[in-house]
Image (tube, rainbow, N blue to C red):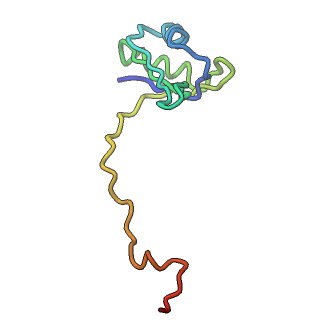
Amino acid sequence: MSVYVGNLSYDVTEENLNAVFAEYGSVKRVQLPTDRETGRLRGFGFVEMGTEDEETAAIDALNGAEWMGRDLKVNKAKPREERGSFGGGGGGGGNRGSYGKSNRY
């Protein structure tokens, strides 16, 4: 299980986040997702800790706490939802060729 950390400063580093969470137990992994196009941090991250008790202690202490000028949002990470196929779009059809044209011949 991992912990979701939201409302992060865009200046945060994995080392910064690791140091803060290490106060509550052993940190196994820190992830800071970046935008695919710009490479910029997305303002949230994930921290995986050694035990569930350590995660709970970190959540209780850090949720709502101010850090690097921002009020953190910290909770248990939800499982990532699988993205399905791109169904449901499109449709319509009908008389497409007649937009803006007179129906008279």
| Residue 83 position in % (x across, y down) | 33, 43
Which quadrant would the N terminus be assigned to in this image? top left
Please, which residue is most extreme toward the front here? 105
Q: Residue at x 54, y 11 (%)?
A: 20
| Residue 97 position in % (x across, y down) | 44, 76
| Image position of 9 (left or right of 21) | right
Of residue 39 and residue 27, the one placed in the foreground of this image is 39
| Residue 101 position in % (x across, y down) | 53, 81
Q: Residue at x 37, y 19 (%)?
A: 52
Of residue 13 and residue 25, the one placed in the foreground of this image is 13
| Image position of 6 (left or right of 95) | right
Q: Residue at x 55, y 78 (%)?
A: 100
| Image: 76 above or below 85 | above
Q: Residue at x 44, y 24 (%)?
A: 3
Of residue 14 and residue 97, the one placed in the foreground of this image is 97
| Image: 93 above or below 44 | below
Q: Which image quarter: residue 41?
A: top right
